[in-house]
Image: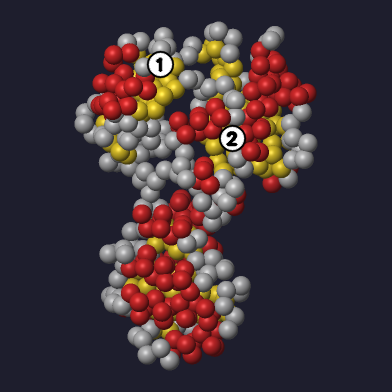
Amino acid sequence: MTSLAQLSRVYPKLLAVRKAAVVASRQLNLLEYQSKKLLEQSGVAIQAFRVLEGRKDEDVLKDFNVNEYVVKAQILAGGRGKGHFDNGFKGGVHITKDRSKVIPLVEKMVGAKLITKQTPKDGILVKSVMVADSINIVRETYLSIVMDREHNGPVLIASPAGGMDIEAVAEETPEKIKTVPISILAGISRAQAEDVARFLEFKGPLVQTAATEIEKLYSLFQKVDCTQIEINPLAETDDGRVISVDAKLNFDDNAEFRQKDIFAMEVHEDTDPKEIEASKYNLNYIAMEGNIGCLVNGAGLAMATMDIIKLNGGAPANFLDVGGNVKEDQVLKAFQILTSDQNVKAILVNVFGGIVNCATIANGIVNATKVIGLRVPLVVRLEGTNVNAAKKILQESGLKIESAQDLDEAAKKAVQAIS
């Protein structure tokens, strides 16, 4: 089997697949203004802002009087300031002191696609714009709180070198990084918060101000089940305030039942609709460019399956891990998602029944094949728990299902089926 490094040159979307293979978790993405709303609700100091979707929302600016306005297109991508729109307008971030120019700027952004270094080549459609108070920053610092396995709990990471790539700071000037483990039971102490504030080089009364902001951020971290809060920069302003200027929040998807309001804000700007549908059924799906659909249980086995398909001259159409607790209705949904891809010319099912019962998979395959009226070749390799009963189910179904004894044989049959 080839290495992951070799595979990354073979599969254009392997980076996403590798991420999925490490942990089958839901990546909740929030727009900038959504993250700032969560901070604001917890009393964290942020820039005052409003959100508009066009001229129809002009009234929200009536009581918004500031010296300077920052107008920022809201998409899930960086580099907005240097980006350009498909309508020819330049820049996803503009600053103006003239309030009368705000709405015209908003209208040039909303409804157009913003193209940056981090977006697809066609860009991402802008549906909303954040208009914020432009603050004068004297100094930028970095602060994050993250769940860390090594410390068995939350860890606070701080640096006086904010507004920069924190990985580069850690590599080039490690003395500018401070790591503070926090007791999951006791939480952050005032002494810890003040010590971090001093390390961030806040002086005089601002030590207490910054410490309070750090405490509020930790409170939010716990309250909304974050796995990470990253503030870059945590800024000192010319009028003596400590402001969280930009925030990135990651959430524990296992806590979705407690955080329904937050997960309801999820944005799917450039996500494949099939990926969204798969996540609703706890299926881990990533589309690729090939023509052999894969249904596998286990991320590692899915990687191996894609690898062997490629080694046999084929090309996988997807990464699809149904997990260890898969039910028949999930198998049906998996088949529906696979066949919704017009590029799929054959399907390969590769299941090793450890936790999962092979008979459950077999019943799901038979039911799915009948329900959707499967018209492409289907190759199935089953091994493990209750495999003999599973094979009997497939044989007695009367359906055109090609069986294979091992993965290599299954891959060869799938490739041959479309040759």
Using the image, determine if residue 374 lies above or below residue 40.
below
Find disc 1 in the rendering and name its residue: 63
Looking at the image, how many numbered discs can be counted on the residues?
2
Tell me which residue sits at (54%, 37%) in the image. 249
Query: From the image, which quarter does the C terminus lie in?
Result: bottom left
Q: Position of residue 113 (x, y in %)?
A: 28, 36
Identify the mark nearer the N-term, 1 or 2.
1
Using the image, determine if residue 101 lies above or below residue 171.
above
Q: Nearer the viewer, residue 356 or 38?
A: 38
Tell me which residue sits at (51%, 85%) in the image. 390
Find disc 2 in the rendering and name its residue: 229
Q: Quadrant of residue 320?
A: bottom left
Q: Quadrant of residue 55?
A: top left
Q: Residues within 10 Å of mark 1 (few under 14, many from 20)?
A: few
Q: Position of residue 64 (x, y in %)?
A: 41, 16
Residue type (three-letter) at the residue carrying disc 2: Ile
Q: Residues within 10 Å of mark 2 (few under 14, many from 20)?
A: many
Tell me which residue sits at (21%, 31%) in the image. 87
